[in-house]
């Protein structure tokens, strides 16, 4: 009989090697599984746990407990998806007779509309970094590239210098599931990147094609980037959130807001929805269509403010 720990290791290795999932995604799966099996050990009074003993009723009880704790529906759905994938893999490998989570329906979630900044707010944020320092040039290049391309945070962090093609103004990125795509970036991003890399070459030394594009600051997010240590996810989140908060009155702004704004502004200026889908690296058009709801909401707001017949009760 295989242990839960060994089965989890096999499953996570499968996600990494066969599915090409990122380290962050795999860690999320690990946390979801560990949380469930801690619950199940107490629920079934069973240590060590026999995988074949896990039932649909036990999983339903677990989901109910999560709901009672006030956990968001989207998080509950993700945890259920983790269990479905885990037991599906275990069944295929012959370690369990069937998948106890297979027939459990995910709770319906209300899709939140993406948070989007105005073009003026984006422009203000991009002007905030000190352009006379290497860290300032790096931060401006990060902002410009994010907004110019709409790539994900993990995709930006993973970029190497050799992934950029300045003559074509394109870059090679690896998205979810290690899917490779070529993404264009604009003139302003190209200028900001060149400024950053030229100063980095003068202050740090020769630039290798396999070197990280954005390197870490030693001693904190505002100190000078030195050496070739890749910038961390937390560093980018902290610096981008800080700059966006200075440029906008909206609260809790993450780097993903730049991706949302990229897509929404493209649609505002007449871009084709399928083209935006490809640029974002979405596998489904329904995901991209969320941005059309943002656009419709904005149009309704403008209509209410500007049209004399929009609201007969308005004074």
Image: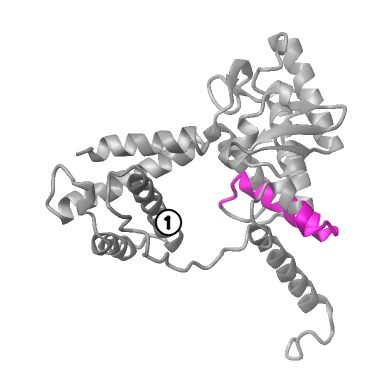
Numbered-mark total = 1
Q: Give the x, y percent position of residue 71.
A: 37, 60
In the rendered view, would you say 50 is above or below 57?
A: above
Q: Give the x, y percent position of residue 115.
A: 64, 57
Q: Is residue 45 left or right of 119 when viewed as pictured?
A: left
Q: Residue furthest top?
A: 205
Q: Quadrant of the N terminus?
A: top left
Residue drawn at 71 percent across, 70 percent down: 297
Q: Is residue 240 left or right of 203 when viewed as pictured?
A: left
Query: In this view of the protein, which residue sits in the foreground, 207 or 16?
Result: 16
Colour scheme employed for the rendering of this structure: one colour
Whether residue 305 appears in this view of the structure is yes
Q: Quadrant of the C terminus?
A: bottom right
Q: Is residue 31 magenta?
A: no
Q: Is residue 62 left or right of 156 when viewed as pictured?
A: left
Locate residue 75: give its quadrant.
bottom left
Q: Which residues are magenta?
A: 252-275
Residue drawn at 65 percent across, 45 percent down: 244
Residue drawn at 57 percent across, 63 percent down: 112
Q: Which residue is mark 1?
A: 75
Residue drawn at 76 percent across, 17 percent down: 199
Query: In this view of the protein, which residue sits in the foreground, 303 or 178?
Result: 178
Q: Secondary structure at mark 1?
A: helix
In the rendered view, would you say 114 is above or below 127?
A: below
Q: Give the x, y percent position of residue 12.
A: 40, 37
Query: Magenta-highlighted stretch: main secondary structure?
Result: helix
Locate residue 295: give its quadrant.
bottom right
Query: In this view of the protein, which residue sits in the foreground, 98 or 238?
Result: 98
Disc 1 crowd, CA 10 A, few/some/many (<14, 14-19, 20+): some
In the rendered view, would you say 35 is above or below 292?
A: above
Q: Is residue 257 magenta?
A: yes
Q: Give the x, y percent position of residue 146.
A: 71, 40
């Amino acid at each position: 009989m295989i242990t839960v720990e060994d089965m989890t290791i096999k499953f996570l290795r499968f996600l990494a090697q066969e599915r090409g999932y990122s380290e962050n995604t795999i860690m999320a799966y690990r946390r979801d599984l560990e949380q469930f099996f801690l619950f199940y050990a107490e629920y079934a009074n069973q240590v060590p746990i026999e995988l074949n003993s896990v039932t649909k009723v036990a999983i339903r009880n677990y989901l109910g407990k999560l709901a009672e704790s006030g956990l968001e529906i989207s998080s509950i759905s993700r945890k259920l998806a983790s269990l479905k994938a885990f037991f599906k893999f275990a069944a295929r490998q012959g370690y369990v007779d069937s998948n106890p989570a297979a027939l459990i329906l995910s709770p319906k979630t209300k899709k939140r509309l993406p948070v989007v900044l105005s073009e003026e707010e984006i422009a203000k944020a991009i002007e905030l970094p000190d352009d006379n320092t290497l860290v300032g040039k790096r931060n401006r290049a990060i902002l410009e590239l994010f907004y110019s391309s709409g790539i994900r945070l993990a995709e930006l962090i993973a970029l190497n210098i050799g992934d950029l093609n300045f003559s074509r103004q394109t870059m090679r990125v690896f998205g979810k599931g290690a899917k490779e795509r070529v993404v264009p970036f604009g003139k302003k991003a190209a200028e900001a990147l060149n400024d950053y890399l030229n100063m980095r070459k003068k202050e740090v030394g020769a630039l290798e094609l396999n070197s990280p594009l954005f390197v870490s600051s030693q001693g904190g997010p505002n100190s000078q980037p030195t050496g070739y240590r890749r910038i961390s996810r937390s560093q980018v989140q902290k610096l981008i959130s800080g700059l966006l908060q200075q440029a906008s009155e909206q609260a809790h702004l993450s780097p993903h807001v730049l991706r949302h704004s990229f897509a929404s502004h493209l649609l505002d200026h007449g871009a084709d929805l399928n083209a935006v889908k490809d640029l974002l690296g979405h596998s489904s058009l329904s995901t991209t269509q969320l941005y059309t709801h943002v656009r419709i909401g904005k149009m309704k707001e403008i209509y209410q403010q500007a049209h004399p017949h929009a609201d007969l009760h308005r004074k």
